[in-house]
Image (spheres, rainbow, N blue to C red):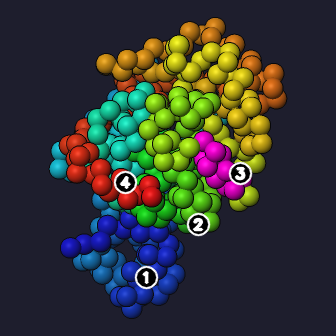
Amino acid sequence: MKVNLLGLDAGALGGFFADRGQKAFRARQVLRWVHRFGESDFARMTDLAKGAREMLAAEAEVVPPPMIADNVAADGTRKWLLDVGHGNAVETVFIPEASRGTLCVSTQAGCTMACQFCSTGRQGFNRNLTTAEIIGQLWWASRALQARAAQEQSTPAPSAARALGATRGGERAISNVVLMGMGEPLLNFDNVLPALRLMLDDHAYGLSRRRVTLSTVGIVPMIDRLRDECPVALAVSLHAPDDALRSRLVPVNEKYPLRELLAACRRYLERSPRDFITFEYVMLAGVNDSDAHARALVELVADVPCKFNLIPFNPFSQSGFRRSAPDVIRRFAERLLAAGIVCTTRRTRGDDIDAACGQLAGRVQDRTRRAGARLARAVQ
């Protein structure tokens, strides 16, 4: 069986070549070809020796998840549905803005967290994605965006010698990556970690730690592990100012209550590339959006350097929740700002193609009942 090189970070790829009697620098060359230049044909990797190319053709491959659907919203947001096998598909979303291009990546087929306001959480869970399936989303999106840019500019398709994902002016189409798609990244840590390393590797995607953000509902031991092994920007799905309400909305709070979660956030800041934690807070009408909730939040995070990202709820069928009114969201934000807390309100993007926050659903063969014991072990 051939090895999919999309799943190998620098260390693993170096081991792959060493096991086959090849020199260590071959790993750097191949990283550049595969990730920076988006090349999947070993014959086109012209600075590799002929023997190395023949070995790769015989024993390796570069295979991203196949694309099932490609949709573009009215605001330019683009969503891909990618096949990850056995009836499962995951969604990847690109959000273009004037100053950045952000790719939202999935890490699991489904999700075990069962957050009540999230469409992904309602559909159940099948399995963790492999590193190749996680990084393959970035690889695929970069190529697709570059091909589209070349077409729009009426220029020939880019050669493998052009930087992956670069625009005509030399800027990357994808400047930021957020692990905020389907799934809880910290429950798939062993596959997420090599993917993060590839995103940061100068021979691969060369992204800054400040421009790679991992979002978690708060798996405390794994926050500590991320801090020790590969600290990137951290976003925490908070959504409530007290344990009673948060446990209702985010069930894992029963295992890791707010006191433990905020302590983990303070520890994370010791090595974080940013000097604050981002707290995500979905605005649910009549549930968590009152003045009293805002005051309680101010008190809750008083000793945690942070910023808040208020997220207007994005509806989906049978959710049972409503989006807070714009004036309610504005007043809530003003309460936080008045207390000296940086606060932004996320602009809803891509909701006409169900690409907005909380709407990603993909297609999952639910194994939640059988996965329950695994989840219990994972969060212990």
- Label 4 sits on residue: 376
Going from the N terminus, do you reach mark 2 or mark 1 first?
Answer: 1
Query: In the image, which disc is placed on residue 266?
Result: 3
Residue 99 percent coordinates (x, y) = 65, 34
Residue at position x 64%, y 53% from top?
264
| Mark 1 secondary-structure assignment | helix
Separation (CA) of disc 1 from disc 4: 34 Å
- Give the residue type at disc 1: Gly
Q: Which residue is mark 1?
A: 15
Residue 282 in the image: above or below residue 61: above
The quadrant holding residue 40 is bottom left
Judge by depth and name the residue closer to the eye, 113 or 314.
113
- Give how far apart the Cα atoms at labels 2 and 1 are: 20 Å
Segment colored magenta: 258-269
**Residue in the image at 61% along x and 26% along y:** 310
**Residue 264 appears in the rendering:** yes
Camera-side mark, 1 or 3: 3
